[in-house]
Amino acid sequence: MMFGSMSIIGIPLIGGFWSKEVIISKTWYAYFHGGEALLGPAILLLATAGMTGFYMSRMWFMT
């Protein structure tokens, strides 16, 4: 359960980090290079990543 949670949270050097980092960075890159319509999705990605980290940590510490 620990490694699954760490992967979903996006802890560096675990598989989930690389996919999450690429998705977030490519969205921000596209926004900053002419994709004004991508501001909303970019902000939602950051908010979702933060909430995922919070709730997975909460689940881990409460069990």
Image (cartoon, grey):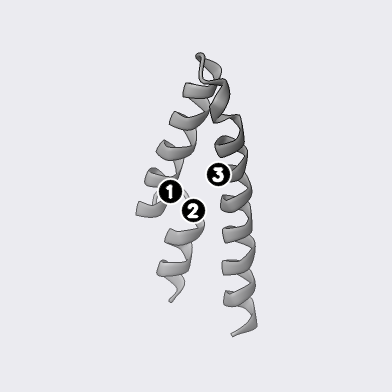
Q: Which residue is mark 2?
A: 11
Tell me the CA gap for discs 3 and 2: 16 Å
For the point 37% across and 45% down, the residue is 19
- How many C-alpha atoms fall within 10 Å of the one at disc 1: few (<14), some, or many (≥20)? some
Q: Which residue is mark 3?
A: 45
59 horizontally vs 3: left or right: right
Measure the alpha-carbon separation of dots 1 and 3. Answer: 14 Å
Image coordinates of residue 28 in percent, x first then y, are 53, 28
Tell me the crowding category of disc 3: few under 14, some 14 to 19, or many 20 or more residues within 10 angstroms, Cα based: some
In this rendering, would 16 be left or right of 24?
left
Name the residue type under label 1. Phe
What amino acid is labelled 3 in the image? Leu
Lateral position of residue 17 relative to residue 53, left or right: left
Q: In terms of secondary structure, where does tag 2 sit? A: loop
Q: Are marks 1 and 3 in contact (CB under 8 Å)?
A: no
Q: Residue at x 63, y 77 (%)?
A: 61
